[in-house]
Amino acid sequence: MTEEEPPGAAAPFNPEIGELARRIRIETLRLNDFADLNIAEAAEVIRHEPVEHALIYQPSGRVLAYAKSRLGKPKEVTIPMREARHLSGNVFIHNHPDDESFSYQDTWLLLRHGVREVRAYGPTRAFVMRSQRETRTFTYLNAAEGLDALIATYLKVQRETTPAFRELVREGTFSEAEAWAAQTHAIMRTIAEIYAFTYAEL
Amino acid sequence: MLLIDPSVTPYSSPARIQAWVERLEALLSDREVREDPESVRAVEGYLVMARDWLSEAVHEAVEPSV
């Protein structure tokens, strides 16, 4: 005789419900949900997300702030000023849904806001940049011209490298996303040399 | 502080790049962006980049390379 099972105990696994539950969970994530997660564990939570999420961690592994992309804008994240005060000396991690490397805004977190380490996690690639003693940094007084110079440098390198990657897309060697991931990686290698910070693919 | 990553690439279609240009233009009127000079500069930089890409994409569409 089969003992009657409690309701739901033997329900067959439904991948669609599993995915829905995961989506609801990720939509309602809050800072406290990361309290017990170290950086690597948090990265695994966000790296497959189609919208961007950002976290600030102390180097010791304590999470200080969490922000996610604006509603309907997958690649725009607002860091409230009350959270931005945590940037200096800490680790900033976020996800890049298209696997690309850093933008000049990400780089600016390192050069101006004193972030010790910036990490970007995509579904298949991840990148890190770290400040070092020789890194060219900017203060409040020279921030405006520093940011303008960084943007100009980034755009120059981007323009120089675009034709080769466009050709790879045209001939079918790379998809659009793969080419942009590779191109941003190439751009960041050059930017890291110019500004003297450590940059690598994880 | 608004952090933006490009939502298109230099090899995207003119229509997609145009949509991003319009989004960036709208961001320059966004109160949160206007209150932060660094965000304004960053968006302006992306606009230069996006218009570059748009111009190139339109050119490619008219005269595809062989």
Image: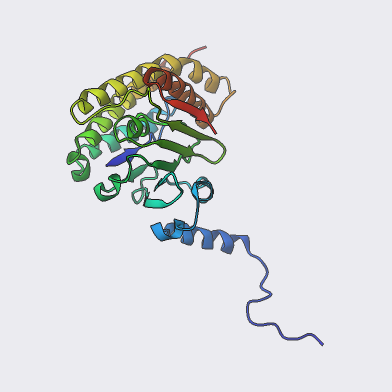
At a point 32% along the width and 31% down the height, the residue shown is A108
**To which quarter of the image does residue A138 belong?**
top left
Task: Answer above or below: position of B60 versus A39.
Answer: above
At a point 57% along the width and 19% down the height, the residue shown is A171
Task: Answer above or below: position of B12 versus A11.
Answer: above
**To which quarter of the image does residue B23 belong?**
top left
Task: Answer above or below: position of A127 versus A57.
Answer: above
Asked whether residue A27 appears in the rendered view, the answer is: yes
Taking depth in this image into account, of B65 and A71 the one nearest to the observer is: A71
Measuring from the top left, give residue B44's x and y in whole percent: 25, 29
At a point 53% along the width and 46% down the height, the residue shown is A40
Measuring from the top left, give residue B30's x and y in whole percent: 21, 43
Taking depth in this image into account, of B62 and A42 the one nearest to the observer is: A42
Quarter containing the N terminus of chain B: top left
Left/right placement of residue B57 relative to residue B39 reads right
**To which quarter of the image does residue A59 belong?**
top left
Measuring from the top left, give residue A16's x and y in whole percent: 58, 60
Asked whether residue A100 appears in the rendered view, the answer is: no
> What colour scheme was applied to this rendering of the protein?
rainbow
Measuring from the top left, give residue B62's x and y in whole percent: 40, 18
Taking depth in this image into account, of A147 and A131 the one nearest to the observer is: A131
